[in-house]
Amino acid sequence: MIPIALTIAGSDSGGGAGIQADLKTFSALGVYGASVITALTAQNTRAVTMVDPASPAMIAAQMQAVFDDLDVRAVKLGMLGGAQAICTVAEGLHGCAVPIVLDPVMVAKSGGRLLPTDALVALRRDILPLAHVVTPNLPEAADLLGIAPAQSEAQMLEQAQALREMGARAVLMKGGHGDGPDCVDLLVDASGVTRLTAPRRATKNTHGTGCTLSAAIAAGLAQGMDLTAAVTRAHGYLQGAIAHADVLGVGAGHGPVHHFHGVWRNG
């Protein structure tokens, strides 16, 4: 049977991030994707113009429908919306035995805020302790901790350890917002630190990178990989998607990465 991963996130009408990016990633990596939509967003490569949250009842009904019928092997959490929605998702995942990947989506690539500030408390309290791995970029880690963004690898490591102390079993600190010719990510778990590097690419087409990376990790976990292997493959997959992003030519702003760069002939 094909492995199944579930994404619980918002819908991106532009197709580059959110539920759409997650399902593309699952499919590209050989995993069947199911979805629970937490919000509709009106957005494109330039801006988020409207967000319409799903009701807690609808979120709960979608989760129950999926778990009642599908053999879900991993769960990816993205944009969850407000505090009430976060509590609903946490309740639906109570006792969940499969790996949970948390991408703490707070701000869209175009700058639109996707997580109300007052929902941070619920995210820290109810969701972070459920995560097998949380995948914040530097601003997201700072928001979760209530401190300034990390400016060095040493500070990235300190913040990852602080997030683990808040309940996450592992943390992937993403260095895309850092400086220097190389982008450095740090996977920190009970076994130690894994350092992943890639050249910093000169492209504006990076919409959906966080969604894509976390979904790729969930795909690997659904396929039975251990966390380090799943993160390492996901990192390589995302770098390929970024490297081929410019061939798509989608939109006038921050275009999407190329999820099917290994499948499409023109990729």
Image (cartoon, helix red, strand yellow):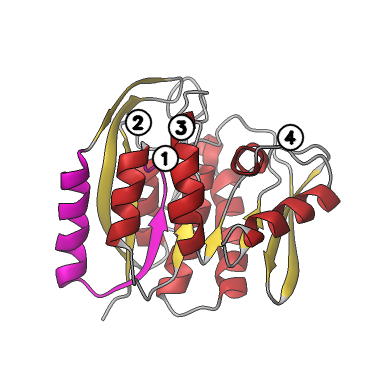
Q: Earlier in the sequence, mark 4 or mark 3?
A: 3
SS at mark 4?
A: loop
SS at mark 3?
A: helix
Q: Earlier in the sequence, mark 3 or mark 1?
A: 1
Mark 3 in CB contact with mark 1 (< 8 angstroms) = no
- Which amino acid, mark 1? Ala
Mark 1 in CB contact with mark 2 (< 8 angstroms) = yes
Q: Which mark is residue 148?
A: 4
Left or right, 220 with respect to 141, comes to left
Which region is colored magenta?
A: 55-80
- Which amino acid, mark 3? Asp
Decide: is 155 above or below 147: below
Mark 4 in CB contact with mark 3 (< 8 angstroms) = no
SS at mark 1?
A: loop
- Label 3 belongs to which residue? 118
Mark 4 in CB contact with mark 1 (< 8 angstroms) = no
In which image quadrant can residue 145 be found? Answer: top right
Mark 3 to mark 1: distance in Å? Answer: 23 Å
SS at mark 2?
A: loop
The picture places residue 17, in percent across and down from the top left corner, at 42, 40
Mark 3 to mark 2: distance in Å? Answer: 27 Å
- Label 2 belongs to which residue? 14
The stretch drawn in magenta includes residue 128: no
